[in-house]
Amino acid sequence: APSGRKMFYSAFREGIRAGKISVLISLRGRLPAMTATTEMREGVMYVKMLGGFSITYNGKVIVGSSKSSISQNNSLLQILIHSREKGVTRDSLEEFLFADREVDNAHHSLRSVIYNAKKIFEKAGLPKINYIISEKNVFYWTDQIEVEEDALEFEKAYLQAKQCKDEEERLQLYLKAVFQYSGEFLPMQAGSV
């Protein structure tokens, strides 16, 4: 009779052939020897957006937890970090942050939220850099500090696996994606981001 590990790999390979990541994720719990842990490197900001929201720097949780509340600061950080390469327009940020409330001056309110978000990092002892940059009414997350975001790493591994021709390499990439996945993308923000 085949071992549990062989059965897992067989089911996993079938999931790969079928291209069904949901099947692969459901199989994850059957292989306890593998974990999704990543060795945390000094000076890297780790951002969790799958299954909850948190930011960790040098082993210290700076923002959030698995039950992180929805706040304007968290919402601002989530959208800017997740969209850090292309940026977010002022109008989009104002709509995202203030659509559900009456705000007299959205520009002023946005500046206030940005100021408060920056203070979070200052109080936590992170490097004194400008984390949120504005260029021609588009806001960007700084590239002065390395960021590793679980949702982006999951997506990269999954897309690489889909393109990969070598079955063993594809298996490894799908495994990386599956073990990176830890829940719904920003569950407290469902439908917003």
Image (cartoon, rainbow, N blue to C red):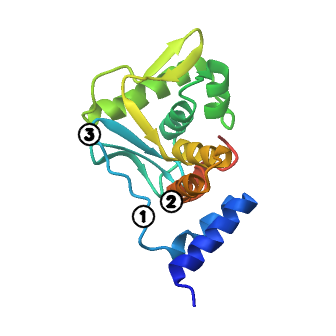
Point out residue 113 in the picture as x, y percentages from the top left corner: 48, 28
Q: Provide the residue designation for mark 2.
A: 179
Residue 94 image-quadrant placement? top right
Label 2 to label 3, Cα distance in Å?
Answer: 22 Å
Front residue (pair 84, 91): 84
Q: Provide the residue designation for mark 1.
A: 35
CB of mark 3 within 8 Å of CB of mark 1? no
Secondary element under disc 1, as helix, strand or loop, is loop
Label 3 to label 1, Cα distance in Å?
Answer: 21 Å
Q: Earlier in the sequence, mark 2 or mark 3?
A: 3
Residue that lies at the very extreme toward the bottom in this rendered image: 1
Query: In the displayed structure, would residue 118 be above or below residue 187?
Result: above
Q: Considering the image in quadrants, where does the N terminus appear?
A: bottom right
The residue carrying pointer 2 sits among few (fewer than 14), some (14 to 19) or many (20 or more) residues within 10 Å by Cα, namely: some
**Left or right side of 123 for 187:** right
> In the image, which disc is placed on residue 164?
none
Label 1 to label 2, Cα distance in Å?
Answer: 7 Å
Q: Provide the residue designation for mark 3.
A: 42
